[in-house]
């Protein structure tokens, strides 16, 4: 099966515009960009896709060895970009896809003109002065809970990730998205995500990068966004006046404004 079919790739928008690729985070799918991507369609050629195990992707393409490291997901993105043959793209990666984008840019700089890292985290676990937001024990407990009761874990964690208690419908949507994933693939992707350490991959990367951070985010706190910005030599940091880890759902207007302003500059 070709990469475009495998990942349910959709190309929309202005066929003459510069290409921009939207890559979703853990437990999500390309539908999570529905408030953001259409705002770029008039000026850009917009590419949307699903990681293996999410949305309309082909679950049979999941490989526990390949997808046991974020490099495997980055290789999937490279295959998509090579198949599309659009030239260098702006890669917009949310959450774990931010680091997947960094890996793509390191491996194939010819494919990436610029990066937009939305709520990025190069490491989720605290480490020797690095504020990853979680202790090793908390991550171990999180993964153990997922193994024991994935659906219950989804219903519990989604509202925390969204961080907007006055808008429970957003937490409900993320819960439903989690529950649409094959639980075995989701648990594997969670381990790959939460146990990764990509801090060293930031150093020496000079591709123009916008780091988008939410003011209050329990998954990737502002200290983490600042760390990413400080370790990417050609980056700009924008802090959105919003709460939660998913500004593509909770504050899409702010996110669109940040992206379009950066690209125009």
Image (cartoon, rainbow, N blue to C red):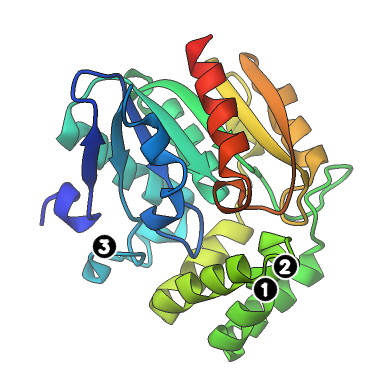
Secondary structure at badge 3 equals: loop
Residue at image mark 3: 57
Residue at image mark 2: 160
* 70, above or below 226, in the image: below
* 9, above or below 13, in the image: below
Identified at 46% across, 41% down, the residue is 36
User: Horizontal and vertical percent for residue 177?
Assistant: 46, 70
Real-space CA distance between mark 3 and mark 2, rounded to the nearest whole angstrom:
26 Å
Q: 30 left or right of 166? A: left
Q: Quadrant of the N terminus?
A: bottom left
* Residue 22, picture quadrant: top left
User: Horizontal and vertical percent for residue 24?
Assistant: 45, 51
Marker disc for residue 21: none
As drawn, which residue projects farthest toward the top? Answer: 265
Disc 3 versus disc 2: nearer the observer: 2
* Residue 240, picture quadrant: top right
Q: Earlier in the sequence, mark 1 or mark 3?
A: 3
Q: Label 2 crowding class (10 Å Cα cut-off): few <14, some 14-19, many 20+?
A: some
Q: Evaluate if marks 1 and 2 touch, with contact meaning CB atoms under 8 Å apart.
A: yes
Real-space CA distance between mark 1 and mark 2, rounded to the nearest whole angstrom:
5 Å
Q: 131 left or right of 25? A: right
Q: Label 3 crowding class (10 Å Cα cut-off): few <14, some 14-19, many 20+?
A: many
User: Horizontal and vertical percent for residue 105?
Assistant: 43, 27
Residue at image mark 1: 157
Q: Earlier in the sequence, mark 3 or mark 2?
A: 3
């Amino acid at each position: 099966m070709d990469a475009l079919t495998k990942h349910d790739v959709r190309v929309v928008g202005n066929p003459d515009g510069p290409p921009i690729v939207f890559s979703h985070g853990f437990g999500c799918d390309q539908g999570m960009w529905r408030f953001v991507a259409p705002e770029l369609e008039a000026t850009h050629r917009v590419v949307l896709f699903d990681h293996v195990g999410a949305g309309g992707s082909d679950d049979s393409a999941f490989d526990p060895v390949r997808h046991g490291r974020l490099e495997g997901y980055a290789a999937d993105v490279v295959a998509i970009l090579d198949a599309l043959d659009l030239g260098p793209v702006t890669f917009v990666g949310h959450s774990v896809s931010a680091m997947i984008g960094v890996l793509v840019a390191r491996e194939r700089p010819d494919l990436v003109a610029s990066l937009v890292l939305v709520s990025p985290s190069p490491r989720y676990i605290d480490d020797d002065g690095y504020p990853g937001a979680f202790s090793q024990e908390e991550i171990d407990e999180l993964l153990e809970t997922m193994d024991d009761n994935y659906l219950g874990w989804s219903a519990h964690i989604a509202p925390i990730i969204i961080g907007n208690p006055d808008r429970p419908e957003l937490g409900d949507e993320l819960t439903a998205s989690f529950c649409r994933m094959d639980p075995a693939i989701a648990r594997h992707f969670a381990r790959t995500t939460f146990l990764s350490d990509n801090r060293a991959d930031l150093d020496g990367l000079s591709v123009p990068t916008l780091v988008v951070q939410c003011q209050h985010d329990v998954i990737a706190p502002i200290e983490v966004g600042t760390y990413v910005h400080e370790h990417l030599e050609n980056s700009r940091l924008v802090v959105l006046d919003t709460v939660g880890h998913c500004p593509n759902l909770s504050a899409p207007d702010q996110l669109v404004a940040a992206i379009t302003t950066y690209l125009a500059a």
